[in-house]
Image (cartoon, grey):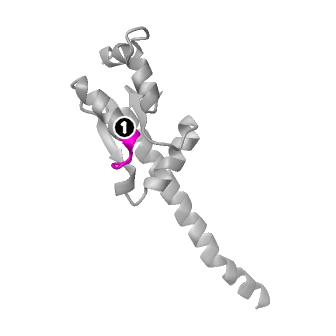
Amino acid sequence: MIWSRQFLCWVPLLLLLVEDAKASNSASGFVQNVIYSNRIVIFSKSYFPFSVRAKRILKKLNEKPFIVELDLRDDGSQIQDVLLEEVGRRTVPQVFVNGKHIGGSDDLSSSLSLRSGQLQKLLAND
């Protein structure tokens, strides 16, 4: 009887860990699905200046990215954790083109430069 009481004390913690794992898996699945189902994806925060800048750059190119506004989602923090695991960054924005990670706002701007032309090449690979 004593053993079962000790075990029962752990049950709420175990349930919490299981729920956390489910949320993490669903956030991971969401991120993968969004990245590979859309030509251009921006993981963003609606109020953040660098996110606004990245969206503006793509708008000037007449591109319409799929935008995930993390600050407007209940699972935004979990999605940022997944991005940290996937690309080594938790910051926003994070831009993907044709499934390839471009980086943040500065990286997007650099890949657009006439010298590199990396962004144009990726956009041409439909």
SS label for mark 1:
strand
Where is residue 33, by image quadrant?
A: top left
Which residue is depicted at the point 24% across and 25% down?
60
Tell me: 3 left or right of 46.
right
Q: Position of residue 85 (x, y in %)?
A: 58, 42
Q: At 44% from the left edge and 46% from the top edge, which residue is drawn?
A: 29
Amino acid at the residue labelled 1: Ile
Residue at screen point 34% across, 15% down: 120
Q: Residue furthest right?
A: 2
Is any atom of residue 32 visible in this view? yes
Please determine whether, in this image, residue 32 is positioned above or below residue 81: above
State the residue lying farthest toward the top: 115
Task: Answer whether residue 45 is magenta in the image.
Answer: yes
Q: Is residue 29 magenta?
A: no
For mark 1, what is the residue? 42
Give the image location of residue 126, x and y in percent: 30, 18
Magenta extent: 42-51
Q: Is 10 placed left or right of 71 in the picture?
A: right
Name the residue at the bottom extreme.
1
| Nearer-the-camera pick, 105 or 75 | 105
Judged left or right of residue 2, residue 43 is left
